[in-house]
Amino acid sequence: MPARKAPATPLEGLRVLDVSTMLAGPYGATLLGDLGADVIKVESHLGDDSRRLGAMRDGECGPFLSLNRNKRAVVIDMQQPQGQDVFARLVATTDVLITNVREPALSKLGLNYDQVRAHRPDIVWIGVTAFGPDGPYAGRPGIDFLTQGYCGVLGLNGDPKGGPVRTGFPAVDVITSLLVSNAALAALRVRDRTGEGQRIEVSLLDALMHAQASSIGSYLATGEPPKRTGNRSQYFAPSGVYPTKDGRFVIITTPSEKFFGHVCRALDADWDRDPRFHDIASRLANHDELDRVMSERTRQFDRDELVERLIAADVLTAPINDVEDVVKDPQIRHNRMIVRLEHPLLGHVDVTGVPIRFYGTPCSVTKHPPMQGEHTRELLASLGYGEAEVERLITAGVTADRPEMLRRRAEKKARRQPAG
C-alpha cells in the first residue's frame, strides 16, 4: 500500500475566519495562516481598527501590514439581514472562528457561539476578551497595557529607582495570540477524535498570568515577592547592560560561575579571585562595585569589537540593537524572519516570517496583507453567488470590494473638504 502523501502545509484544507480587530485575535489567526490554513479576514465597511493606527504607506497602515499576512479579506455588513445570510454561507465552510467582539455587540452581530454553531455544528469558536467571559471584570474594555497593571508586570518592569514602565512592545497581545493558535490546534485534534467542535475562551489577563510562572509562581511557592531589578538579575551577578567606547551598549550575563570566569578571561581581569566577587552571593552583595569595574573595562572597546571578543570566550552576551540593526541581523535573516512579498499596491513589502520551522511540511508567507475588500468578489463567487448577485450586494452596501471601498473613502474625504 503506497504511503499517503503528506499535505503541502500542516493546516492545508482548514479554513479560519478572523472576525477580530487589532492584535491578539488577528495575530492568532495569522499564525494559523502561516501554518497553511485558509484565513479569511471578515471586516465591516469601517474595517479593522489597526488599519488606521500608526505609520502609513500609500494609504496602508504599518501595523496592519505587519500583523495580517497570509490572509484574504472580505467586507460584510453583518448588521443587515442579507449580511447575515452571506456570513452564514461563509461560516458553513469554516473550521475555526476567532473573534474579540464584546457583548452585547457579539450577539447583535450573530457572532456568539450558539449563533455560529447553528451554521456549522462542529465549529471551533474562540473568543478573546481582556479579562474573561464572566466574573467581576467581564464585559469591561481592556487592552495589553491594562493587564500589565492588573498582573503586576508594570510594577516589576523598569529601573528600581524609577516608576513603573510597560513593555516596549505589546507582549501580552502576542502571548495571547500564541494561546489562540494553540487552542485552535488542540480543539481541532479533539474534533478529529470526536467529531465535535467547541467554544474556547482566551483572555489577556490569563495569558499574562500564565507567562509569569517564574515570578508569581515563585511567590506562591515561597511567599517571597519578586523585586524590580531593572536590567539586573534577582538571582545572580553580574547581569546587566554595559557601555562601550563608541557610545553603545552590550548585554553581559552570568548565570553560573563558569560564565563569570569566561567574562574575567575575556576582559583580562582577575575579578573571580577578588573576595568581593568570588561567588554569586558576594557578587550580588557588591553588584554596584562589580558593575563599576566592569563598565570601566567595557568602555575600552567599541561595541562590535567587544561582542566579538566576548563571544570568542563563550560569554553570554548580545549587542543592544536598534530596529535598523535588527532587520539586518544575519541570524534573523538566515532564519527567514524577515520575508519579502509583492503587494499589488505597494510593490515590495517586508514582513516578519514564520517562527516555527517544519521539515516535513514546510511553511511560508505566501499571501500579502490584504487590502480591505480585496477578495470579496472571489470569496462570494466561491460561496455560490453569481456575478449579478454580487453586484446587487455591493450596491446595497451589504458587502464591498476594493473599488467600492476606495469610492467610499474618496466620498468621505470630499465631504470633509471645506466648501468653495
Image (cartoon, rainbow, N blue to C red):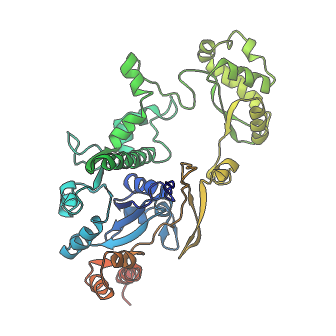
Q: Is residue 341 above or below residue 381?
A: above
Q: Is residue 299 visible?
A: no
| Name of the residue lying farthest toward the front | 1
Q: Is residue 187 above or below residue 54?
A: above
Quadrant of the drawing holding the C terminus: bottom left
Q: Is residue 69 visible?
A: yes
Classify residue 38 as left or right of residue 80: right
Classify residue 366 as left or right of residue 401: right
Quadrant for residue 73, please give it: bottom left
| Name of the residue lying farthest toward the top | 275
Tell me which residue sits at (34%, 66%) in the image.
Answer: 42
Q: Is residue 101 above or below residue 368?
A: above
Question: Where is residue 140 shown, x and y percent of the image?
Answer: 24, 48
Question: Where is residue 44 shown, x and y percent of the image?
Answer: 31, 70
Quadrant for residue 365, please give it: bottom right
Q: How many marks?
A: 0
Question: Where is residue 372 shown, x and y percent of the image?
Answer: 41, 72
Q: Is residue 106 above or below residue 160?
A: below
Quadrant for residue 30, please give it: bottom left
